[in-house]
Image: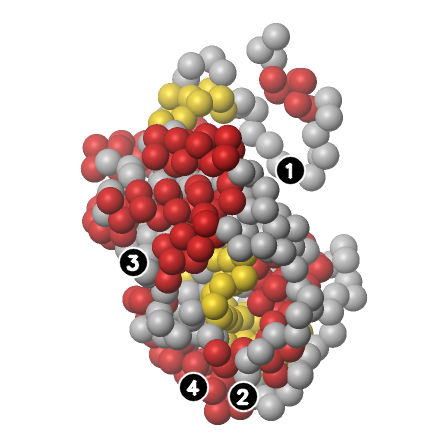
Amino acid sequence: MTDFISREAAHTSGLYHKREIAIVHGKDALVWDVDGREYIDCVGGQGSANLGHGNVAVAEAIGAQARILATCTELFYNDRRAEAYEALARHLPAELDRVFLCNSGTEAVEGAIKLAFLATKRRGVVATMRGFHGKTLGALSATWGQEYRELFGPLLEGFSHVPFNRTEALDAAISTDTAAFILELVQGEGGVRPASLEFVREAERICRARGAMLIVDEVQTGFCRTGTMFAIERYAVVPDLLCLAKSIAGGVPMGAIAFSRAVGELPKRAHSSTFGGNPLACASAVAAIGEMERLGLARNAAERGAQLLEGLSGIRSPKVREVRGLGLLVGMELKENAGGTIRALQTEGVLALGAGPTVLRYLPPLVITQAQIARVIEATARSLA
Ligand SMILES: *Cc1c(COP(=O)(O)O)cnc(C)c1O
């Protein structure tokens, strides 16, 4: 029976807003539905498919490791885990030389907040308006979206939000009671909004002056998305804690917190994860990072991102307010709800995402080709017409 939609609908949680197609196969930046219809995938696993679908090196690494050893908790040392740390270290600033491995983005944020509490013996956290950091209760306290928060309040005490890119608001918000300031360098979910260089510099300066930890959440911007392995390179900022997940392991669930010596010695067992650092995810991460290097994904993201930004900016439509982005994290803000255009794009064979009610978000695999980007631009122009 190939009616996967009704079979899934019979049991699904009901928490997701689903589109009426069943995706069953993918290769690079393309995916196919159960009826064999082809789409250019600008959803890209919501940021977890930077490497593209069906990467052979990753598939082989997972298969081989599954036969050798799939589980090995951090009670022991492990060969693949050592290699995964080294693969990350090749690209991280030398200061961020310790890493905690977990399984998702929200878990990386959750852990980073706990480590900041331990490091500072403080409890205040400052986040940004429109910021997104995940939906477990601690991370949700840092997330801005009222639609996610209001059903669960009161959330953690001591969390506050400053307007994004309003440099002058930082001085009053970050105090000597602040454990951490957390931000995304490009707000993804919040509408594809790059941080200004000045905002990031001032945040770093004030955090250092007041003894607060600076947490950069690169769950979406990491792993070549913005044209460098990590967006912190573009901003020349070294946070105390860096949150990673999504594309870290070529599509296999994994998260990480990289942190500096400023965090200090950590009490044993103050935080842990059974699956964190498992050999299967580590093998996948080693292969994925190797493929990012071999394929020059950072460079392709920069070049194809520039092509997409320029092409979308060239579309003359009274519906468009602004096109913005960094690398292949590109958003088109409309003067109306983006839902209709997203549906029209799907009919054109392009899967795109929203980012808030009025922003169309393009998050394709970074292996996307010049010809495919051209097709995305043409499909967008037709969808807006
Ligand atoms: C997706 C995302 C998260 C949450 O990651 P999950 O793996 O869905 O828990 C956190 N922060 C940012 C910036 C994200 O884009």
* As drawn, 3 above or below 192: above
In the rendered image, the quadrant that contains the N terminus is top right
- Label 1 is placed on what type of residue? Tyr
Residue drawn at x 66%, y 70% as measured from the top left:
268
Identify the disc placed on residue 16. 1
According to the picture, the residue beneath numbered tag 2 turns out to be 211
In the image, which is nearer the foreground, mark 1 or mark 2? 2
Relative placement, left or right, of 139 versus 347 is: right
- Name the image colouring: secondary structure
In this rendered view, identify the residue nearer to me: 261 or 224: 261
Q: Is mark 4 on a helix, strand or loop?
A: helix
The residue singled out by tag 3 in the image is: 228
- Give whichever of discs 3 and 1 has the lower sequence position: 1
Question: Residue 317's x, y, as percent?
Answer: 32, 44
State which tag comes first along the sequence, 3 or 2.
2
| Label disc, if present, on residue 205 of the rendered structure | 4
Tell me the amino acid under the disc marked 2. Gly
Question: How far apart, in angstroms, are the residues tagged by discs 1 and 2?
Answer: 40 Å
Residue at position x 31%, y 43% in the image? 291
Disc 3 is placed on an element classified as loop
Q: Residue at x 52, y 48 (%)?
A: 254
Left or right of 83 in this view: 371? left
- Gap in angstroms between the C-alphas marked 3 and 2: 29 Å
Residue 291 vs residue 186, the one in the foreground:
291
Q: Which of the numbered marks, if any, corresponds to residue 72?
A: none
